[in-house]
Amino acid sequence: MSPDPTFPKTVVLAAPRGFCAGVVRAIDIVDLALEAAGAPLYVRKEIVHNRHVVESFEKRGVRFVDELTEVPDGQTVIFSAHGVSPAVRTEAAARGLTVLDATCPLVTKVHLEAIRYARAGFEIILIGHPSHEEVEGTLGEAADRMTLVSTVAEAEAVPVKNPDRLAFLTQTTLSVEDTRPIVAALQRRFPGIRGPARADICYATQNRQLAVRAIAREAPVILVVGSKNSSNSNRLVEEAELAGARAYLVDDVSEMDPAWLEGASAVGVTSGASAPDFLIEAILETLRKLGATEVREVRVVDEDVFFPLPPELAALRKARERALAPSV
C-alpha cells in the first residue's frame, strides 16, 4: 500500500475510547465462566454489541441465543450486559438454569429506579429506542406503569393520568444531545416530573461523546469503530456530525474507504464502548501506510471506573492470579 499524497498526515485519536468498565466486566464474566464450566456456554443475546467480540467467543464454544428455550436443561446461561426483564429471570429460575449476571451496574441502577418509582405509585416515562435490549429489560420492571418515548414529538403527545406522580428514566447509551430536548419537552408539559438523582446516561457514553466532539474541532473526517447494532457507537457518529465533521461507522479496517479521507487536513479516530483495542490498532496501521505521519491523542478525561465481578467468579479470578504470579 503506497502513501497517498492527498491523504491527511495527522491522525487525531480520541480518548477515552473503546471498552468501558461494564464491557470489561461482561467479557471477564464470560472468560471466567468458560474456564470454570467449559463449553458449551450459553449467553442470552450478544454479551456486548460488537461482532468481533461475539465471533471470538463463538470460536471458543459460546452459544448466543435469543431466548432461554434454546438453552438445554442443566446448563449455565449468562445474561448480557444490557440486562433482562424480571420475566426472564423467573423463567431461568423455573427451568433450574445456573445463571451468571453480566448486566452492567449502570443498567441495574436504572432498573432499581424503575422499581422504586413503580412501588411509590408513579407513572414512568422511559426515554429510549424501541426494541433495544436494554429498553426491553427496563420496561419489564414495571410494564403497567411505564411508557416508552423516543422523540420530542412523542414526548409532546404522551398521555399521562396523574402529572403529580410522574417520573422519567433514560436508556444509558443515548446521546446527551438526543435526550436533552425530550426531557425539556416533558418538563415543560409536566413541571413536577421527577428524574433520576444522577443522570442515567452512563459515564462512558458521555466521556466518549465529549472526546469525539473535541477531535471534531480538529479533524473534518472521523472514523468511528463499532458494530452497526451498537447504540453508543451510532451516537458517536451523530455527535461527530453535530460538531461539523463527516463521520463513518466501521466494524473494522475492511470497511474503511480511503476515498473518504482524500484532501482532509486530518482524520479523527475513536471507538464505541464495546469495540476492542486491536480494531483501532489495525485502523491506525492502515492510516500510516496510506501516508499519515503523526498520531496525536486528545484526552478529555481520565477513566478509573471499575465494576467488581459476581462473587462466584471473583474467587476464581483471584485463584488464577495467584497461580500466574511469579514465585519469590
Image: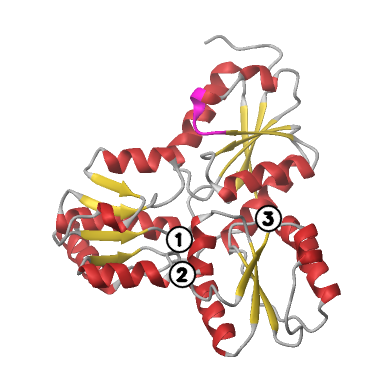
- Residue 47 falls inside the magenta stretch: no
Pinpoint residue 172: horizontal percent, then vertical percent: 58, 62
User: For mark 2, does the 10 Å Cα neighbourhood hold few (<14), some (14 to 19), or many (20 or more) residues?
Assistant: some
For label 2, the residue is 105
The residue under the point 62% across, 23% down is 292
Query: In this picture, which residue range is highlighted in magenta?
Result: 250-254
The quarter in which the C terminus is drawn is: bottom left
- Note whether residue 326 is visible: no
Pinpoint residue 31: horizontal percent, then vertical percent: 27, 53
Mark 2 touches mark 1? (CB < 8 Å): yes
Pinpoint residue 234: horizontal percent, then vertical percent: 62, 44
For label 3, the residue is 175
For label 1, the residue is 22
- Pick whichever, 66 or 201, lies toward us: 66
Earlier in the chain: of badge 3 and badge 1, it is 1
How many labels sit on residues? 3
The three-letter code of the residue at mark 1 reads Gly
The three-letter code of the residue at mark 2 reads Pro
SS at badge 2: helix
- How far apart in space, not on screen, are marks 3 and 1 (Cα)? 18 Å
SS at badge 3: loop
Q: Toward which corner of the image does residue 207 lie, by quadrant?
A: bottom right
Determine the residue located farthest toward the bottom in the rendered image.
120
